[in-house]
Image (cartoon, rainbow, N blue to C red):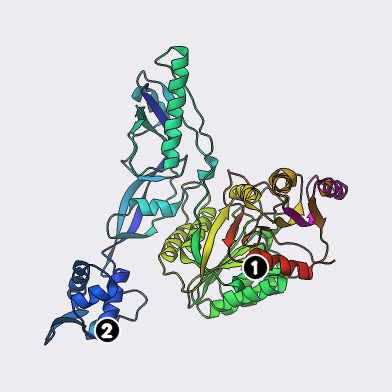
Amino acid sequence: MTTVQVIFPVLKGSRRFIIERGRRWSVIEHLLLDAVSRGAASAADLAKQSSLPRRVVVEAFIRLMRAGWVEITATSRGPLFQITAAGASLVHYEQLPSATVREPRWRGFAIEQLSGSVYRGRELDLYHKNQIDSHVGENPVVYLSASDAHDLEDMGEVFTTIEGEDEIIIGVDRGSEKLAERYAVVTVKDGEIDGLPGRAPEKLRNAILKAASEISARLAENGKTSAPATAIMEPVEETPAATPSAYDPTDLIIDGEDHWRSLDRIISGASERVIIHSTFISDERAAAVLPLLLRAAERGVTIDVLWGQDDLGSSTRSSQVAAAKMQAEIDTAGRTGSVRVHPFSTNSHAKIVFADSQKGWNVLVGSCNWLASDYKSFETSFRLREPILVGQLMKRLAGLSQGRPGVWNNFAIDLAVLGRRIMDMPSPKGRKVPMRLLYGAEHARLVLKARDEATRRIFALSHRIGITAESLTLLPSLAAVKENGVEASFFYGRTTGPLSGEAGADLVRTFARSGLKVKPIQRPRIHAKVLGWDDDHLAISSLNWLSADPSEGKPYKEIGILVNAPKIADNFMGHFAHVMPP
């Protein structure tokens, strides 16, 4: 194979990170300390009870003894480990206190813009665009283009990459410098990539190998051995794996009144933090929610309010005006530092509420504009309680909050650090079902998944119907109707954009003749955004399945969750049928 040099864009930067250094106690060490708090025991007994190797048990107790929390006592049974008074005072803590130190350190990093993977400062050969020609030889050169989906860096991934052993990044000194645009150069020969770290993701490796293979084949056809060329990476569709997650049927929140009660409960139950992201803010609804927020602030809860009304979507930017008025009322109430209504738009249509509680973190994800809804429409949201997914979602919100690439404001840094901490929390006990978060264009791919998997029915609820309904949802579902004989039903509240009421009626009649039921519903007012199939698959989202066109370039403009649980879709449709007019 011809030797090919592949060039791809990278963002290079450095920051002064606040690093907490020192080994932290593991769950195993905490459990062993708890075991000897119930009575002295030998290493052999504890190894047998825990199914751990005896060596692991002994090494754990060596550390616990160095900390002064365990001691060895001689008994007729031989030497036994027993807890000390100092250990007994700490064993019931949620996490054992670590002997760590904090120190600032400058660290460099690089973020490639094809798959978004992060590297330490010296792991890639990086060049300014004006230096590339002097660093490539006579071999063919392939340029890969950046993906719009990775326009904003994931600060959490940056932290993970540059942390050393026994280090955790807990903060970043805010810097105003932009990330520098650079280019990485790697060499491909005989199907091997030189210059790329072994931990690089398959998505990036496959793109590099594909580009090199294509240009080599093209040169072979033309009888050449050397020529410059340009290739553009094609998007690689990846379906994230589902995560077994805590689930209870009451986690599904349906109808307006239930949403108001859920908002009241999640804010009232918070002990430290509440974060609300509502696409819109209205004066009337902000006034209704504000007393809940002020009462929480009186208990010491810190509250952040974000909004996502598109800067380009409204000449009045009503949410920005309402946000400023809401903050003024908070200032008048004397809660300026406790309740912050951020003045910038995230440009996201997501509707999310985060809050901690005595049992862990909860997130409400779905269709409800928490600071604009009158709570009288038919809404649907989901209460997410699984820490790893809650933390991932918090990190995505950090990305929405950071602004331009490379501009890490204090609030975004705070959310990124918090998201990583939540991901490390223990999972709640109880029933688990597969769940995965949905972002942007993954919604469109989910429709195709429903088309391919449905054996009995497909359905969707959407606040609006527009001209994109055919290509996004209706045509794929029509294929399932024709090929598998499934029942397909779609419900919407109103037409939008260039699709007039009359055109909407024509669309309904056209698809009805093909076996699809597309039905407008005036009462109850539909604001829910739900896609489901068969009995056990339900996606709850901010996306209008019959009007929005989810973009690869704005991956977090729409956010939802797919839940695969026994009868969840069937129960939802039963509830909807109960409130829907005949």
Determine the image quadrant of residue 422.
bottom left
Residue 88 in the image, given as x and y percentages of width and height: 27, 84
Residue at the (31%, 51%) spot, across then down: 106
Pick whichever, 42 or 332, lies toward us: 42
Q: Secondary structure at mark 2?
A: helix
Residue 76, visible in the rendered structure: yes
Instruction: Say which element carries label 1.
Output: helix
Disc sitting over residue 37 in the figure: 2
Residue 371 rendering spot, x and y as whole percentages: 67, 66
Q: Position of residue 501 (x, y in %)?
A: 86, 50
Mark 2: which amino acid?
Ser
Magenta part of the protein: which range?
A: 486-511
Q: Residue at x 43, y 43 (%)?
A: 179
Image quadrant holding the N terminus, namely top left
Assess whether mark 2 and mark 1 are in contact (beta carbons under 8 angstroms): no
Q: Is residue 109 above or below residue 50?
A: above
